[in-house]
Amino acid sequence: PDFDVIVAGEVIEHLNNPGLFLTGVKKLMSPDTKLLITTVNAYCGFRGIYYALRGRRGVAEPIHPDHISYYSYSTLRHLLDRHDLRVENFLYYDIGVEHRKFSRKPLLWLNDICVRLAPQLADGLIAVCTLD
C-alpha cells in the first residue's frame, strides 16, 4: 500500500537504527509519496546557550533521556541521501507554544534572538522527502 504522506514526527532521534527505519518506510512509498520528518535540531540556539552556561564540562547536556541522536541540517541530509531519499524542502521550526510556558523567560529571550539572527538555530528541523 502506498501513501500520499507519511509523517515521522519526532521519531528519528529515538531510533537505534535510523537507516533500517528509512529502508522500511521506503517500502510504503510511491514516487508521489511525501515523507515528512521532524526532529530536534542539534544546533538549537536555546540548548546551545543553556549548555554553554550550565553544561558542567559536558556532564549536563540539555537532552531528553529518550534521545540517542541529534541531527543537524547536514547530518540529516547525509542520512537521507544514503537511503536514496531526495529532500524537496528543508525547514526549521521554533519552540512550540506548549513548551514555551514551561521555559525560563531569559532562555526564551535568548532563543528568540538566536532564531531572528539565524533561522538554522531554531528548535527543530523539518525535511520533506520523496523517493530519489
Image (cartoon, rainbow, N blue to C red):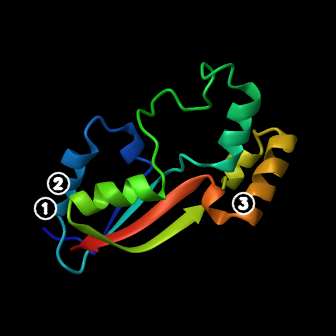
Residue 85, by quadrant, is bottom left
**Residue beneath label 1, please?**
27
What residue is drawn where x is 72% and y is 60%?
A: 115
Q: Quadrant of the N terminus?
A: bottom left
Which residue type does callout 1 highlight? Lys
Residue 110: image location, x then y, percent: 81, 49
Lateral position of residue 89 relative to residue 27, left or right: right
Closer to the eye: label 3 or 2 = 3
Real-space Cα distance between discs 2 and 1?
7 Å
Residue 89: image location, x then y, percent: 43, 75
Question: Which one is in front, 78 or 123?
Answer: 78
Q: Name the element at disc 3.
A: helix
Real-space Cα distance between discs 3 and 1?
36 Å
Tell me whether the residue at label 2 lies in contact with that at label 1, contact meaning CB atoms closer than 8 angstroms.
yes
Which residue type does callout 2 highlight? Thr
Residue 116: image location, x then y, percent: 76, 65
**Residue beneath label 3, please?**
115
**Residue beneath label 2, please?**
23
Closer to the eye: label 2 or 1 = 2
Real-space Cα distance between discs 3 and 2?
33 Å
What residue is drawn where x is 75% and y is 64%?
A: 117
Question: Which one is in front, 11 or 55?
Answer: 55
* Pointer 3 or 1: first along the chain: 1
Q: Is residue 20 above or below residue 9?
A: above
What residue is drawn where x is 84% and y is 50%?
A: 109
Which residue type does callout 3 highlight? Val
Closer to the eye: label 3 or 1 = 3
